[in-house]
Image (tube, helix red, strand yellow):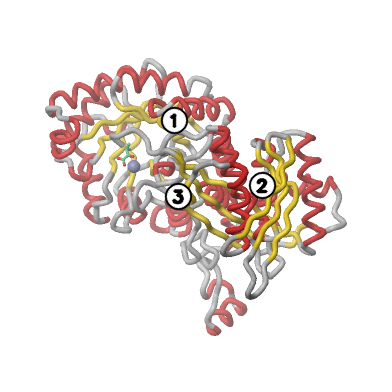
Amino acid sequence: MSNNRLVVFDTTLRDGEQSPGAAMTKDEKLRIARQLERLKVDVIEAGFAAASPGDAEAIHAIASAVRESTICSLARTGERDIRAAGEAIKPAARGRIHTFIATSPIHMEKKLRMKPDDVVEAAIAGVKMARQYTDDVEFSAEDAVRSETDFLVRIFDAVIKAGATTINVPDTVGYAIPANWGDRMRELIERVANSDKVIWSTHCHNDLGMAVANSLAAVQAGARQVECTINGLGERAGNASLEEIVMAVKTRGDIFGLETGIDTSQIVATSKLVSTITGYPVQPNKAIVGANAFAHESGIHQDGVLKHRETYEIMRPEDVGWATNRLTLGKLSGRNAFRTRLQELGIVVESEEQLNHAFARFKALADKKSEIFDEDLQALMSDENLEIDLEYYKLVSARFHSETGETPSAALTLSVGGEERKIESSGSGPVDAAFRAIESIAQSGSELLLYSVNAITTGTDAQGEVTVRLGREGRVVNGQGADTDIIVASAKAYLNALNKLHAGTTKLNPQVETV
Ligand code: KIV
Ligand code: ZN
């Protein structure tokens, strides 16, 4: 790989999933992995195989389905973890094991309770064992930011000798400051033996809001892999955001002189998919993918942009996949136009049956909403995948009543395991009434942890996209629903979450103790 190529390592499905409440099912992970492949990320860290059987299964499924990106599993340096990772990535066209151990005095002494010499031995053993499964082995020194540089040099020397091909230097706790982090990376690259035989990587957390700045400083100092997540999702304040790093490197090519393999036109679609599935909304003023990232409010700015776009725009919205509210299809559009537009949007339809089902729902939506935008199709297809996958509880019909001075009520007909059930309930509002009605049938015993509504496009006829997060006995699931009627969207989202609880496909939250 040439020295001006920056490897993009996405860890949305591993570190991103460590955000509270962001646990994903295997099918959701597969959908995100397919989208990451379309985005053309170099490496997808698909999970931590030893964390749970569900994680191992998801990595295996992704390794079987994705051909263009390298599929990676995280592993501690112990035999059980490496074996689990090695088995999980087996079907991959290109598989990587990412093994790590903590190297800071505080972690070695207080958490691992290991002597530095033993940590070095464990790292060597882990890397050697990982090499028996794949020749693509990454080693990370957890909490490198608070580790002694001499010790890092020693352990990196040793793991390179043992066969590591990528050396990752993580700021696990988000403690680094850009100039300093760059100096640190430069010193390591200079002092470690055979440093030119490996790819140097950085992995930054955002506790002080500097994950992207630190990652870019490391890149300027010689790192040629960045570890990041979509929307900056991740443990605590999150990880470095993929879209911000990629667009900084692209937009400031004059400074970085580097290329990534990313298809930037897929950025917004990926951001929306991750946000919908995890229930983590994107703040409107978030760089690149926030709804206002390209909106000009001040008259002076609007005037400037109309006269010459580059007066106030350093990137073009279409370069990152903002469809600029493109009107795509309408009531009279046929099945072929529908299929073609889905293909253009990179949405995969698994079968003719799914296409027919989705087309019928598109027609129903077009009856309610005169203009159908790309965003509507994306939401419709997300909803479609959810319906096809899990249908134990299904909304058949709904009637809501809400009037000033009256108690709101909901009358629902649900299909429960194929049997129709009717139920009525009242509540503090129609959404509350709908949720109570559903619960009086499902008796799930779950707790509502999050309820959020977003308008997919502008206008009062826009579809509402609802996320409902439910928790039960340590299990957390996110349900989604979209409809032009936000109460119907809410009921669908609640049922979708219940279906996930019913299917029991998510693992317990959170992951194993040491990451
Ligand atoms: O933050 C961290 O140190 C990690 C490692 C496992 C790379 O996520
Ligand atoms: Zn991390």
Q: Residues within 10 Å of mark 3 (few under 14, many from 20)?
A: many
Is residue 446 in view from this perspective? yes
The residue positioned 66% from the left and 44% from the top of the image is: 346
- Residue 72's mark? 1
Q: Are marks 1 and 2 in contact (CB under 8 Å)?
A: no
Ligand 1 position by quadrant: top left
- Residue 242's mark? 3
Please, what is the three-letter code of the amino acid marked with disc 2? Asp
Q: Which residue is mark 2?
A: 383
Residue 120 place in picture, x, y as percent: 18, 25
Q: Horizontal placement of 366 versus 244: left or right?
A: right
Q: Residues within 10 Å of mark 2 (few under 14, many from 20)?
A: many
Q: Quadrant of the C terminus?
A: top left
Please, what is the three-letter code of the amino acid marked with disc 3? Leu
Which of the two labelled residues, at mark 1 and mark 2, occupies the earlier sequence position? 1
Which of the two labelled residues, at mark 3 and mark 2, occupies the earlier sequence position? 3
Q: Secondary structure at mark 1?
A: strand
The residue positioned 36% from the left and 19% from the top of the image is: 131
